[in-house]
Amino acid sequence: MRESKPKIGVYVCHCGTNISGKVDVEAVSSYASTLPHVEVARNFKFMCSNPGQQLVIDDIKEKGLNRVVVASCSPRMHEKTFRKACQTAGINPYYFQMACIREHVSWVTEDPEQATQKAKDLVRGAVARVAHHQQLASRVVDINPNVLVIGGGIAGMQAALDIADGGKKVFLVEKEPTIGGNMSKFDKTFPTLDCAACISTPKLVAVGQHENIELMTYSEVADVSGFVGNFKVKIRKKPRYVDADKCTGCGLCTEKCPSKVLSEFDHGLAYRKAIYSPFPQAVPNTRVIDAEHCIYFQKNRCRACEKFCEAEAIDFDQKEEIVEINVGSVIVATGFETFDPTPLTQYGFGRYPEVYTSIQFERINNATGPTSGEIVTKDGKKPEAVAIIHCVGSRDQNHQKYCSRVCCMYSMKFAHLVREKTGAEVYEFYIDIRSPGKGYEEFYNRLQEEGTHFIRGKVSQVTDIVDSPEDEGKLVVVAEDTLAHKVRRIPVDMVVLSVGLKPASGIEDIARMVGISVDSDGWINELHPKLGPLATPSDGIFVAGCCQGPKDIPDSVAQGQGAAGEALSLISRGKLEIEAAVSTIDPERCMGCRQCEEVCFYGAISYNPVLNVCEVNEAICKGCGNCAATCPNKAIELRHFNNDEILAEMEGLMFAPVDTERNFNEKAA
Amino acid sequence: MKYGFFPGCSYKGAAGYKESTEAVCRVLGIELEEIQDWNCCGATSYWSTESLKAYVLPARIMALAEKQGFSEIVNVCNACYSTLRKAQEKLSGDETLKEKVNLALAEEGLEYTGNFKIRHLMEVIVNDIGTDKIKEHVKAGLSNLTIAPYYGCQLNRPWADIDDAHNPVLMDGLIRAVGAKPLENYSAKTECCGAAQMVAYKELCVPLNRRIVKDAVNKGANAICTVCPLCQLNVDSSQAGLGLPKIPVIFFTQLMGLAFGLTEEDLMLNKLLTPFKTAV
C-alpha cells in the first residue's frame, strides 16, 4: 500500500576516490535522473559527511522528496546514518534505500566501464524498490540495567568491578571454584616484575565483597534467551557439597581428607585433596568436594571431612541447581588455556621429567606453588642451566599459525627469575623477539645485559642422548643457531616450553548461546577489528580479554574496563529502539504447522495452541526472513522485505528501460 | 597376502636381510612378489643433482608395478620407501612434471598414474598381520633381551602418518609381540645414521652413529634392531672405532625369525659384524 506518489532523490557518493576511482559517478547520477519517479539525482564527495547529509535533508524539505536512495558503501556501514537524516528532514526513516556500489562494485570490479554499468544497475534496482517502501515504526523497549559477566579472570573481574562501582548490579559467573583465572597462577608479571598476587588479590577480595556483585563460582551458563536489554539467562550451579554460608574456610577438612589428586591449579606438579580450595587466596574461600575423587562418593565410606567440620558445613546431599537471572547485557570474558605440547614429540614433554610448560613454570616460581617458589628440578637440585623454547605451538604451520603475543615477554621474565633465584645460565631459543609494549623493549635490553643467552633458532629436538661428557645427566637442546650458522647442542637441567595461548574450552558453547561466532582459530569475532573491538554483531553482547585473541594483562584489563563502559553506556540509554524490519504472521492464513518455529534461529516464534497459530515476538526477531521463506501458506511477511519490495527491486535490477545503452536482446544475440 | 615387492639395491647384499625376510614371510604367509625389471630408486642423493631424472627413476619402478598389476608396493629400505613416497607426492601435485616423466616412461611403453600405496614391510607386518597373529608363531623365549628399536630418520618424516615423526612406537609393539623387551626410552631411535654420506664424509657420520650406539648401550640394550639395510650397515660397521662396548645390530626380520624358532644359519646371523647370540 503506497501512502503517496513517490518523489525520489538519488545521491551517488564518491567516497573520496574509493568509488569515483573506478565508477563514473557523474554518469551514474545523470542516468539516475532519467529513472521513473526520480526528482533529483546528485553526486557528492562524501555523502556520510555533514554537508552530504544536509544535501538530502535540504532536498527533502525544499523539493518535497518522500523517498531517498543513497548509492555508496554497504548498508552495514551507513544505513543508520541516512535513515536518521531522512527522519531529521521529516520523512519516515524506512523510506530510504541504499545501493552498495563500493564493496559490491568499485572494490571488486577491475574494468571501469563494467563497474559504472553495475553501479547503474544497482541504483535502478534501489529506485524501483524504494518506491514500494512502506512507513514503519520502530518500537522502544526498556533496558534491564543488570549485567552478566561470563568468566572471572582479570578481564571479567575488572569489567564486573567497574560496572558495580558505577552502581549497577553484576552477576559474575565462573566455572572454576574460585575467581582469579590464569593470572592468579603467575608469580611475577612482565616487564615491571611486580608480584601477580599482590596486584590481583585485592581485586579478588573487592569482587568478593562488592555489594553490587553477585558472585556465582563453580557455575556455568546453561542457556541464554531474549535480546538486547532483556536477556533471560539460566545458570547451572554445580554442587560444592559444602554450605557456603557455614564454611569458615578453616581448611581442617582438607587437612583430614585422605584422597589425593593431581592439582589442576598446579598443572599436575603437585597434589591436592578431594576437598580443597585451589589456592590460599581463593575467593570465595568455601571448599569444594571433587565428587569424582571423593572416597564417600565413590565407595560410600570415609566422610572424614564431615566428622571434623565444626561448622557442620559439609552437605553431601547438595544437588545441581539452575538459577534464572534477567540481564540487559552480557560481557563474555572466558579467557584462554595454554597449548598442550604433547603432540610436539620432538620436545619430549611427558617423556622427560625436566621438560615443563610455561604455565607449570609459573607455578614453580610461585610462592604457593609445588616448590614454594624455589626453582629446583624434580630431584630437588638447583639447575645450572635452563633452556626456554619460544613459539611452542605458535607460529607453527602444523599447529597454530598465529603469534600468541605474550610468550616472548613471559619467557624473558622467566630468564630474569631463573638468573635471580639460581644464577643458572639461561638459553632463550627464539625465532623473533616480539616486544611491542610500554617498557617491553627496554626489558629485552635489560635481559641481554643480565647475561641471558639469546639463540636465534627453532629447536629441533630435546634429547637425553649423551654426545660429550658434559651431556651426562642433562637434557640436550639441539637447534640451528641461524646467526652463528651452526648447530648448537646445549646441555641443560630444565627445559621450559613457552606454549602458546588458545581459547578456553567451552567457548563455542558460550558463543552459540549468546549468538556470536568464533574465527577459524576459535577466538570470538568482534564487531569490527579496529573500530568495534569490544562489541559483537549481537547487540548487547560484549567481549573482553583473551577470549577475543591472545593478549597480556594490561590489554586484558583495558578491555575489561572498555567492555564495562560499553555496558554502562547501554544501560544509561535506559530505552532501546528495536529494528522495525521484523516478521509478522497473518493469523487468518496461518494453519499452525510450526515450520517457522523450527527455522527461527533466535527463538522469536512461539506456537499459540489456543488459536492454533504461530506468533512472533518482535523484540527478539532479527528480521532474517527464514520464517517468511519457509511458510507454506505465505502467512508470514517480513516487513521492509515484503514481496512487492523484493520483486520490484529484482525487476529494476534485471530489466533496464528500453532506451538505455544496454540492450539485453542484442547481448543475447 | 600378496604384495608387489621392491627390494632395492642393498637388500640382497645386506647381512641376512633377504634370508630372514623370506623366512619370516613364509611363516606369516606373506607373498612378496618382486617387481620385474626394477631399477635403483636413486636414493636421496640423486634429487640434489638431477631433479627431473631423479623423478623418472622411482616413477619407472612404480609404473612397472602398476603394469604388473600391483596396488601396493612393499619396501624393505627406508631410503627406497621415502624416495618412492616423495616422488608419488610430488607427481600427484604437479601435472607438468608428471607429463614430462610420462614422456620418458613412454619410451618403454610405461605410464605412471600414481594409483597405488607405498609401504614398508615392518609396517605391513604390524598393521596387516597384527601382533596377535605374530604371537601365535612365537616359539623361542626372548624375554631376556632388551632391544633398542632403531627406526632411522626417513621412515616417518615428513609424513608421520603410520607413526609419530619424532617418537615412533610401531616397532616397540612388534618387539613386545615376539617376546622381547623394547628399550622404551631409546632417544636415538630416529637419529640419522649418515646414510650414503658415510662413504664421502666419514668424519661427520661416525659421530652420528656414536649417538645411536651409545644411547642403546648406556640404557642397557642387548641389541639394536633396524628396518633398513643402510642403517644396519652404518651402525654395525662404525662401531670399530667408537671405543664403546659393542652391540649387535640386527634386522627386525632376524629378531622375528629367532622368535619363530628359526636357526642362526637360516637367518644368516653370522654375517653381522658384531656377533649376536640369543643367549647374551
Image (tube, helix red, strand yellow):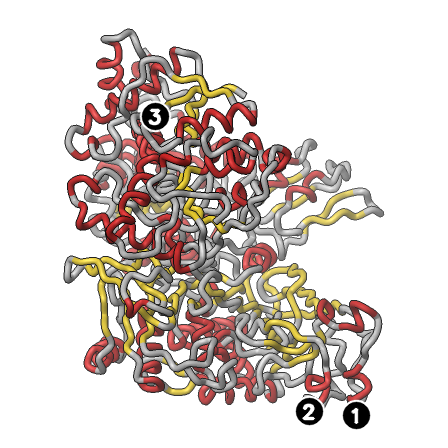
> Looking at numbered disc 1 in the image, what kind of residue is underneath it?
Glu
The crowding category of the residue bearing disc 2, from other C-alpha atoms within 10 Å (few below 14, some 14 to 19, many at least 20), is some
Name the image quarter holding residue A104: top left
Identify the secondary structure beneath mark 1.
loop
A602 vs A192: above or below: above
Q: What residue sits right under mark 3 in the picture? A: B12
> Looking at numbered disc 2 in the image, what kind of residue is underneath it?
Cys
Q: CA distance from mark 2 to mark 3?
A: 76 Å
Q: Chain of mark 2?
A: A
At 25% across and 22% down in the image, what residue appears? B57
B260 vs B107: above or below: below
> Looking at numbered disc 3 in the image, what kind of residue is underneath it?
Lys
Identify the secondary structure beneath mark 3.
loop
Give the camera-side residue of B17 and A358: B17
Identify the secondary structure beneath mark 2.
loop
List x then y, in percent, for residue B215. 37, 57
